Image (cartoon, rainbow, N blue to C red):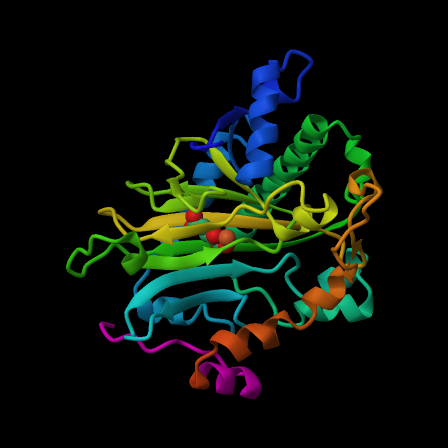
Amino acid sequence: MADDIPLIDLELALSDDAPKSLLESVRQTGEELGILQVVNHGVPDDLIDEFHDRIARVLDLPRQEKANLASPTGHPYRGWRQWPDDFGRLELERFSIGQFDNAEDAKSAGLSEEYAQLYAHDNVWPSQDPGLADVARRYHDASVGVAEKVLELYARVLGVSPAVFPTVGRPYHTTFVVNDYPTWIYPDVPEDEDKLLLLEHADGSALTVLHQRGDYDGLQGQAVTGEWIPVPIVPGALQVFSGSLLTHWTNGLLRAGRHRVVAGGTVTRRSTAVFWHPSLDTVIEPLPAFVGPDGSDFEPVLLWDRTKGQVEEYLQVFGRPEQVAAWREGRPYVAELSEA
Ligand SMILES: O=C(O)CCC(=O)C(=O)O
Ligand SMILES: [Fe+2]
């Protein structure tokens, strides 16, 4: 049983000299937990720091200034947004970046007219830092490189060619978000369950590449036993979650990593996630290499069909009435906070 999150030297694990025990630990973690920490991952430390230092300067601006970074059309996955709980207390603050700045850029990159409409609501970039978009792009692209390497590693430990996954050398679809979690300023409570800032979930990606900053172990991953295991902050490390697409492709062999975030610490906890998927025209189905004589219970699904309605579905489930109204009327939404 994986009872710890292994720290994997990615370059070593992909090399001819990879120790058998290292590969075995990746396989076991992939099947039982779905969360790795990786070092030697190829993303330069100074790129990680530059992106996080710059986005920190934006997220540390006064709230009134940040309100100008809300999506002008109320899109929940573009620009800055605060996320209050049912009592109006801040749980999470996010800065979300679309893969393309606008629909024109998406079309220039080869997306069809229909798919490019995902980017009809432009990215929001702060005028305070004209260089942020470029650094964000470089950090994003480097994170995609990590996802590709981890997929190659999972293929290796499962004894299949990486080419069985419909991603190698092909276009991909990503989403990209920075999460800022406030410190816990309320009376302490003994149970982690009572101070969750991000509820238990598995990502819908193939793989998610995460970086975390802070001064306590706020991120937890769930073992098959149900037990919650802290994912410690290791300088320079990146965390890689398997998402539900990887489970689908491998006919259930690789587990999607369930995770959640608990409040704590003395400084704002920050994480950055790049959610990596194959191209939107991919039919997600169990790959022949993983389907035995018993077949599969997983139904095929076109990634586009799963993606196109996400904003509406999200707002239907989680949207506040004022937020939904702002989206329908195409104007910015800034949540009311009890302590703001
Ligand atoms: O903040 C974290 O460590 C996790 C973030 C996360 O799970 C997400 O954005 O999906
Ligand atoms: Fe997540």
Across and down, in percent, residue 270 comes to 38, 49
Residue 130 in view here: no
Is residue 238 shown in magenta?
Answer: no
Residue in the picture at 18% in, 61% down: 186
Number of marks in the image? Answer: 0
Q: In this view, does 325 lie to the left or right of 248?
A: left
Residue in the picture at 28% in, 69% down: 89
Across and down, in percent, residue 326 comes to 49, 84
The answer to whether residue 261 is above or below residue 66 is above
Across and down, in percent, residue 225 comes to 45, 43
Is residue 335 shown in magenta?
Answer: yes
Residue nearest the viewer, comparing 168 with 161: 161
Residue in the picture at 37% in, 40% down: 230
Residue 273 in view here: yes
Q: Is residue 269 left or right of residue 201?
A: left
Residue nearest the viewer, comparing 256 with 184: 256
Q: Farthest front residue?
A: 294
Residues rendered magenta in the picture: 323-340
- Quarter holding residue 156: top right
- Quarter holding residue 80: bottom left
Across and down, in percent, residue 41 comes to 56, 29
The answer to whether residue 56 is above or below residue 145 is below
Residue in the picture at 70% in, 32% down: 152
Which quarter of the rendered picture does the C terminus lie within?
Answer: bottom left
Q: Farthest top residue?
A: 17
